[in-house]
Structure formats: structure tokens, C-alpha cells
Image (cartoon, grey):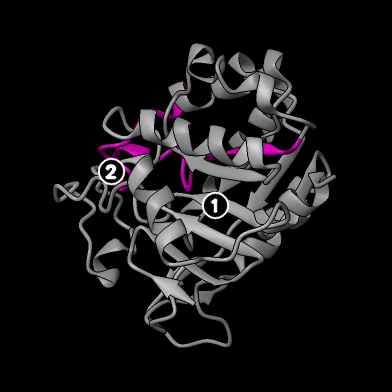
């Protein structure tokens, strides 16, 4: 196991990578404060992609072509501040043959991915998860993030690139996310969204499963009943998964 905040891995199956610690999103459900980071500032903890690569080498972190590369979890990996470093990391691991996943609340410009496309060996080697826990209450709950109207454009704008773009309904907020069920259905139909993840919230309440990007046993998966309703209803229109890793495995070659 290795954990310095920027890199976390328990085994060769998966490695979590962050080029900065902290986020500016101010989401009310954010878990960062429980992990010692801020959801209102980047805390001047940004590092370069070279720092990441050197850290992996110097600490002899074992990675092979089957290791899943997950970007973010302690940051928004497509912020203007760290987007360039994120792209360098994506390019590096695509060339190594790894699958790469990233989740974002940003609008991604097609131009930002132009230098990456020729490195993708098969559809699903790179998968982008567009995150939204709420639509109606976005301005209250995710009040310093990119507008939903902008985020949803990813499903149209990036379609020409043939990269799987997943609707990441995570976390499901009890009594909140469910209110947008019809809106999510509309998004799925109108934008022809093929894959959706219904994600469980992380809380301090102990459960059978701890989060996968830390070994400190501070945060746990805690399902809410609304998830079952969302899964049942949205499954009528698209592929529904409960974990991002299920999507990655679905596309893995």
C-alpha cells in the first residue's frame, strides 16, 4: 500500500492519482473536510505530472497495463489550474496501455482532448464520468461548480470523439436527487446517454464497506433507499451501474 495524498494504491489493480489536493466547488455533501482537505480552496498543494511519475518510480509502486488509473477524488481534475497536468497523466498511461477514468463537473472542450485521441487503442480505454447529484437544487448544493446546463453539453460535444461519457449520478442525496428523476430520464433520452452510474454517498457512519481511495477508515458507503428507485426507473432507458469500476470493466479489452 502507498498513500501520500497525491497517490493512493492498495494493490496492483487500481491507483488513485491527484495533481492537487482540495477543491473550489463548495458542494454541501463534500467529504474532503473529513479527509483533511478543503472544498473551498486548493490549499496551494498542486504538483506536476513529473512529480507523480517520479513518485511512482522512486517508491517502486507496482503498476502494469491492467492497473486501473483513477484521476481525482481529492480534487476537480479538470480545473484550469491542473487540467494540463491531468492531460499529461492521461497521455502517459494511455501509452502504457492502461484504462483511465476521470470524473468531472466541468465542461470539457473537444480541443482539450485532441492531443489524446491518437493514443486511445480501443473504445473505453478512456472513460469520462460527468458528475451531478442534483439538477433542481444545483445552485444550493453545488453552488460553486459548473452549471448543469454546461455539464450536460459534454454528452453532445464529445460524441464525435467516440469516448464513453457516463452520467455520474453521485452521490444520491436522500430526498433530493430523486426529485430530479424525470429530468434525468429526459437527459438520458434527449442526449442518448448509454451509461449511468447511480452512486452511494460517503459518510462517517460505519458500514461494511469503506471508501476505496483511502485506508484510514474514516468514510463509509451508506446507501439510501432512493438509489433503488433510481436504478429501477433509469434501467428502463439505459445501462445502469452502481460503481464506476463496473463501467470500466464493461469496456475493458
**Considering the numbered disc 1 on the image, is that residue within a helix, a strand or a loop?**
strand
Q: Residue 164 location in percent, x, y?
A: 71, 32
Q: Nearer the viewer, mark 2 or mark 1?
A: 1
Can I make out residue 32 in this image? yes
Real-space Cα separation, disc 2 to disc 1, in angstroms: 20 Å
Q: Is residue 200 above or below residue 151?
A: below
Q: Return the residue nearer the eye: 118 or 215.
A: 118
- Number of other residues with Cα within 10 Å of mark 2, as a class: few under 14, some 14 to 19, many 20 or more: many
Residue at 40 percent across and 33 percent down: it is: 78
The residue at the point 68 percent across, 60 percent down is: 242
Q: Mark 2 points at which residue?
A: 25
> Going by the image, does 71 lie left or right of 46?
right
Closer to the chain start, of discs 2 and 1, is 2
Q: Residues within 10 Å of mark 1 (few under 14, many from 20)?
A: many
User: Number of marks in the image?
Assistant: 2
| Residue at 55% over, 64% down | 200
Q: Can residue 166 be seen in this view?
A: no
**Pick the front one: 54 or 170:** 54
Question: Helix or strand or loop: what does disc 2 sit on?
Answer: loop
Magenta run includes residue 241: no
Q: Position of residue 139 (x, y in %)?
A: 30, 37
Residue 159 horizontal/vertical position (percent): 69, 18
| Depicted 1 relative to depicted 165: above or below | below
The answer to whether 128 appears left or right of 74 in the picture is: right
Residue located beneath label 1 in the image? 70
Q: Which mark is residue 211?
A: none
Marks 2 & 1, CB-CB < 8 Å contact: no
Q: In which quarter of the image is residue 245?
A: bottom right
Q: What stretch is highlighted in magenta?
A: 124-149
Quarter occupied by the C terminus: top right
**Looking at the image, residue 100 lies above or below residue 178:** above
Amino acid at each position: 500500500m502507498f498513500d501520500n495524498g497525491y497517490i493512493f494504491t492498495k494493490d496492483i489493480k487500481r491507483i488513485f492519482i491527484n495533481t492537487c489536493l482540495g477543491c473550489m466547488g463548495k458542494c454541501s455533501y463534500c467529504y474532503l473536510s473529513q479527509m483533511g482537505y478543503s472544498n473551498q480552496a486548493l490549499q496551494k498543494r498542486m504538483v506536476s505530472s513529473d512529480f507523480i511519475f517520479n513518485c511512482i518510480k522512486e517508491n517502486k509502486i507496482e503498476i502494469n497495463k491492467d492497473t486501473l488509473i483513477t484521476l481525482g477524488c481529492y480534487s476537480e481534475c479538470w480545473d484550469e489550474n491542473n487540467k494540463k497536468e491531468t492531460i499529461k497523466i492521461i497521455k502517459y498511461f494511455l501509452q502504457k496501455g492502461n484504462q483511465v477514468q476521470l470524473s468531472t463537473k466541468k465542461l470539457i472542450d473537444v480541443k482539450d482532448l485532441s492531443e489524446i485521441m491518437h493514443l486511445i487503442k480501443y473504445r473505453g480505454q478512456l472513460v469520462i464520468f460527468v458528475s451531478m447529484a442534483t439538477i433542481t437544487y444545483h445552485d444550493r448544493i453545488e453552488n460553486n461548480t459548473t452549471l448543469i446546463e454546461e455539464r450536460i453539453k459534454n454528452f453532445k460535444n464529445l460524441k464525435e470523439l467516440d469516448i464513453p461519457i457516463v452520467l455520474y449520478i453521485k452521490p444520491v442525496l436522500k430526498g433530493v436527487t430523486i426529485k430530479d428523476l424525470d429530468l434525468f430520464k429526459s437527459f438520458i433520452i434527449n442526449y442518448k446517454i448509454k451509461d449511468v452510474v447511480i452512486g452511494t454517498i460517503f459518510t462517517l457512519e460505519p458500514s461494511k464497506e469503506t471508501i476505496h481511495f483511502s485506508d484510514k477508515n474514516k468514510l463509509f458507503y451508506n446507501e439510501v433507499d432512493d438509489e433503488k428507485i433510481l436504478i429501477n426507473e433509469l434501467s428502463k432507458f439505459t445501462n445502469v451501474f452502481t460503481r464506476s469500476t463496473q463501467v470500466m470493466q464493461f469496456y475493458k479489452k
